[in-house]
């Protein structure tokens, strides 16, 4: 905890900003507003640490730090985007800290020397320390921490005797030189990067003996410790020197060194702060890349998943980190421009970490049981909002660039459809949203305007012929829900293996046919009993099937059980769609949409509204859009033609469905239907439910009406919809 978390966090937080910029913040913002700035910044990091602690105490933490934690919560897409950009940001941060170190050396120890040469030598030294192993680097950080504490002790020793209450009162209020260009917000933006080191310990997660204990305790202790230091620095600086001295950026010496009892220790502290930050980033970046590469999000990075030695040191990733940091050193002119972007990526990481914890909490996933009890969804949400506000406060342009860059990486990984081997909260979030919507849907009163087809389709003995499934898909695609039902005849106990096998077969069929459908398999003593069972029990709440799709029986032995099934479905108040295909139509590729019209034979509102609505839904599919709908009505003599035509025209207008009205005059219904719809792609006709004992007569009558037509859809509506709504 102390060596792997507290020390790197503390060394990163107490960095160059404390030595080089903090006096300016106190001089411009005044003591009062500086305390507010420190408090706000510390609050955001504290809230983020609460979220971090909740996640690390809720799962087995492995290497990868922020990448590991976010990917296991928000999924591979967010985790991959974070892993890639956070690694690059950490690698370039090494160059920034090394350059800061070299400039401090040139300014105070070796004037006239090449800062590029010193930066390169320092970078090689940092690389060598980290390449040797984390244990060596952590021991070196103890020494650096001692120097840093000694420099702070030197400051306190000089500031306390110099404290003047009159100077303190004069520095209490702000003194901005050019408001509104300078304000508490600009000072906040200047100071906040100083406290963004809270992930330095988490980045070492794979090297910690017990990450779930070490990370929360070590990070929180570091925040409390460094927060106390910053608060005390603000108070003592405000009483030790006037505002004009504190805010003098052009002075020959650092203000903090001028106040210090031993100025040399402040110079040593600057060296220690920059060097320790470089070491922390050089240690953290390779471990992020190693964990990222292990997950196989980008196959080209797989070689970097390999570790070395018993401690699995990421030496290959360390070499790449060194190459990136050295390239950034050589392109020093571009570093100042890209520095704000690096800060943005840090903030995005913290924001997404808060967001992950927020979603884990609100989805109420039973697996979310963190041992850390001080995190709540409200604290996580506040932390996420705070990070977003800070991003735009620091630099709104770079904030937009960073968010856009992350979004691009996210979309790229999403298109790759990476298969993860871990559970993330996407499914939990989807479940919770679905649960709430189902409950809300259940409370809402049904209105015919909101009717949607929820179809349960049966295909007899097998799904080897996909015609029914495809038409069910076309009726519901983008508008409703389709379930493919299958009944296994026999006892459940003796059919368990077949139940599982048949469900896998149905799932495979759905995927191969690219259908938007769900499988449903049951075992029952008889086929009819199984169908009745599915019709009664399948579905959830308002998403129970309102329509049953069946195949029309062409075998005489199936007529009686088919009629019995129709009566059962009718008694359960479900609408029925029975599709009849003649033999030549069955031999055609079912995905080949036939030429011709979509004919709807109107005989009144009882079945007509559902028929017309189904025809409209069918025509909404891309493959069917060129097939015109015809609304047909048969009459026995010419006298009523105009009246019926006007009625059909008005019905179409009120229904707001694109269709053409047609009136057919004939006394022979069978002949008229055959002649009129001979070239139709599909024909809709209404039907009545046969009474017991009338099944054969009913079947013969409807078969005669269908005649030689290729595709006929018989419809019996139980209402619930209205084409006039």
Image (tube, grey):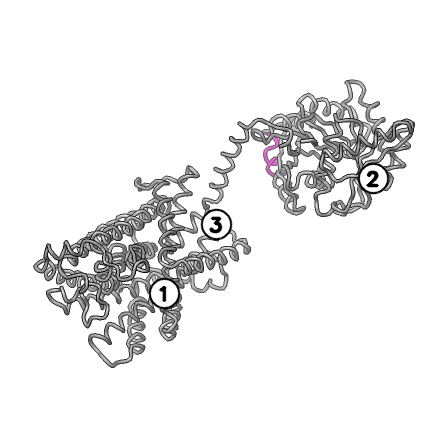
Q: Give the SS element for disc 1.
A: helix
In the image, the segment drawn in magenta is: 493-501
Residue 87 shown left or right of residue 540 in the figure? left
Image coordinates of residue 149 in percent, x first then y, are 17, 60
Which residue occupies the foreground of this view, 531 or 356?
Answer: 356
Q: CA distance from mark 1 to mark 2?
A: 70 Å
Which residue occupies the foreground of this view, 161 or 2?
Answer: 161
Label number found at residue 339: 1
Image coordinates of residue 75 in percent, x first then y, are 46, 49
Name the mark nearer the viewer: 1 or 3: 1
Residue reaching furthest to the bottom: 112
The residue labelled by disc 2 is 710
Which residue occupies the foreground of this view, 521 or 596?
Answer: 596
Would you place residue 640 above or below residue 234 in this image? above
Image coordinates of residue 513 in percent, x first then y, are 67, 46
Would you place residue 636 above or below residue 182 in this image? above
Residue at (31% x, 49% y) in the render: 44
The residue labelled by disc 3 is 421
Is 500 included in the stretch rendered in magenta? yes
Mark 1 vs mark 3: which is more N-terminal?
1
Q: Are the residues tagged 1 and 2 within 8 Å (C-beta)? A: no
Q: CA distance from mark 2 to mark 3?
A: 48 Å
Mark 2 vs mark 3: which is more N-terminal?
3
Quadrant of residue 371 within the rendered picture: top left
Residue at (17% x, 64% y) in the render: 256
Image coordinates of residue 283 in percent, x first then y, are 32, 62
Pointer 2 local density, CA inside 10 Å: few below 14, some 14–19, many at least 20: many
Mark 1 vs mark 2: which is more N-terminal?
1
Quadrant location of the C terminus?
top right
């Amino acid at each position: 905890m102390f060596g792997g978390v507290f020390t790197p966090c503390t060394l990163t937080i107490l960095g160059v900003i404390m030595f080089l910029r903090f006096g300016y913040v106190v001089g411009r913002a005044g003591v009062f507003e500086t305390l507010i700035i420190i408090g706000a910044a510390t609050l955001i990091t504290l809230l983020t640490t609460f979220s971090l602690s909740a996640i690390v105490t809720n799962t087995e933490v492995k290497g990868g730090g922020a990448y590991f934690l976010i990917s296991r919560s928000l999924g591979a897409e967010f985790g991959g985007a974070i892993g890639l950009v956070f690694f690059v940001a950490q690698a370039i941060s090494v160059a920034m800290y090394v350059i800061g170190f070299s400039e401090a050396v040139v300014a105070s120890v070796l004037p006239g020397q090449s800062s590029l040469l010193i930066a390169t030598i320092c970078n090689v030294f940092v690389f060598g320390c980290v390449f040797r192993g984390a244990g060596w680097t952590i021991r070196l950080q103890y020494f650096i921490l001692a120097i840093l504490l000694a420099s702070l002790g030197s400051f306190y020793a000089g500031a306390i005797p110099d404290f003047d209450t009159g100077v303190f009162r004069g520095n209490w209020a702000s003194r901005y030189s050019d408001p509104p260009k300078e304000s508490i917000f600009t000072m906040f933006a200047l100071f906040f990067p100083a406290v963004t080191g809270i992930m330095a310990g988490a980045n070492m997660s794979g090297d910690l003996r017990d990450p779930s204990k070490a990370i929360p305790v070590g990070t929180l202790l570091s925040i409390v410790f460094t927060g106390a230091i910053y608060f005390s620095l603000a108070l003592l600086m405000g009483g030790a020197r006037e505002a004009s001295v504190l805010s003098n950026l052009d002075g020959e010496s650092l203000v903090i060194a001028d106040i210090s009892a031993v100025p040399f220790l402040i110079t040593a502290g600057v060296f220690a702060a920059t060097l320790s930050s470089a070491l922390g980033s050089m240690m953290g970046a390779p471990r992020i890349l190693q964990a990222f590469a292990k997950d196989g999000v980008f196959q080209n990075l797989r070689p970097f998943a390999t570790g070395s030695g018993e401690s699995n040191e990421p030496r290959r990733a360390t070499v790449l980190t060194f190459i990136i940091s050295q390239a950034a050193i050589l392109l020093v002119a571009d570093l100042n421009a890209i520095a704000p972007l690096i800060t943005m990526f840090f903030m995005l990481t913290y924001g997404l970490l808060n967001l992950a914890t927020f979603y884990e909490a609100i989805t109420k996933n039973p697996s979310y049981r963190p041992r850390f009890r001080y995190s709540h969804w409200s604290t996580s949400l506040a932390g996420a909002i705070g990070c977003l506000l800070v991003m735009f406060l620091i630099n709104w342009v770079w904030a937009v660039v960073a968010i856009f860059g992350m979004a691009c990486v996210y979309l790229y990984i999403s298109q790759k459809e990476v298969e993860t081997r871990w559970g993330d909260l996407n499914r939990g979030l989807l479940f919770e949203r679905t649960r709430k919507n189902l409950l809300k849907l259940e409370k809402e009163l049904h209105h015919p305007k909101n009717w949607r087809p929820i179809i349960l389709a049966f295909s007899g003995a097998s799904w080897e012929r996909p015609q029914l499934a495809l038409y069910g898909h076309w009726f519901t695609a983008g508008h409703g829900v389709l379930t493919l039902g299958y009944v296994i005849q026999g006892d459940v106990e003796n059919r368990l293996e077949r139940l599982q096998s048949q469900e896998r077969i149905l799932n495979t069929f759905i995927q191969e046919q690219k259908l938007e459908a769900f499988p449903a398999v049951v075992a029952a003593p008889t086929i009819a009993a199984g169908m009745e069972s599915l019709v009664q029990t399948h579905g959830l709440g308002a998403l129970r099937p309102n329509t049953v799709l069946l195949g029309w029986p062409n075998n005489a032995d199936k007529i009686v059980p088919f009629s019995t099934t129709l009566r059962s479905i009718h008694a359960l108040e479900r609408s029925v769609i029975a599709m009849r295909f003649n033999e030549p139509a069955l031999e055609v590729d079912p995905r080949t949409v036939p030429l011709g019209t979509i004919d709807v034979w109107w005989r009144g509102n009882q079945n007509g509204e559902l028929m017309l609505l189904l025809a409209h839904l069918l025509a909404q599919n891309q493959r069917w859009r060129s097939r015109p709908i015809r609304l047909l009505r048969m009459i026995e003599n010419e006298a009523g033609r105009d009246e019926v035509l006007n009625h059909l025209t008005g019905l179409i207008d009120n229904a707001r469905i694109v269709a053409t009205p047609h009136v057919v005059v004939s006394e022979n219904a069978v002949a008229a239907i055959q002649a009129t719809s001979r070239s139709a792609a599909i024909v809709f006709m209404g039907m009545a439910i046969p009474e017991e004992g009338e099944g054969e007569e009913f079947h013969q009558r409807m078969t005669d009406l269908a005649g030689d037509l290729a595709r006929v859809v018989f419809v019996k509506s139980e209402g619930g919809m209205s084409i006039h709504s």
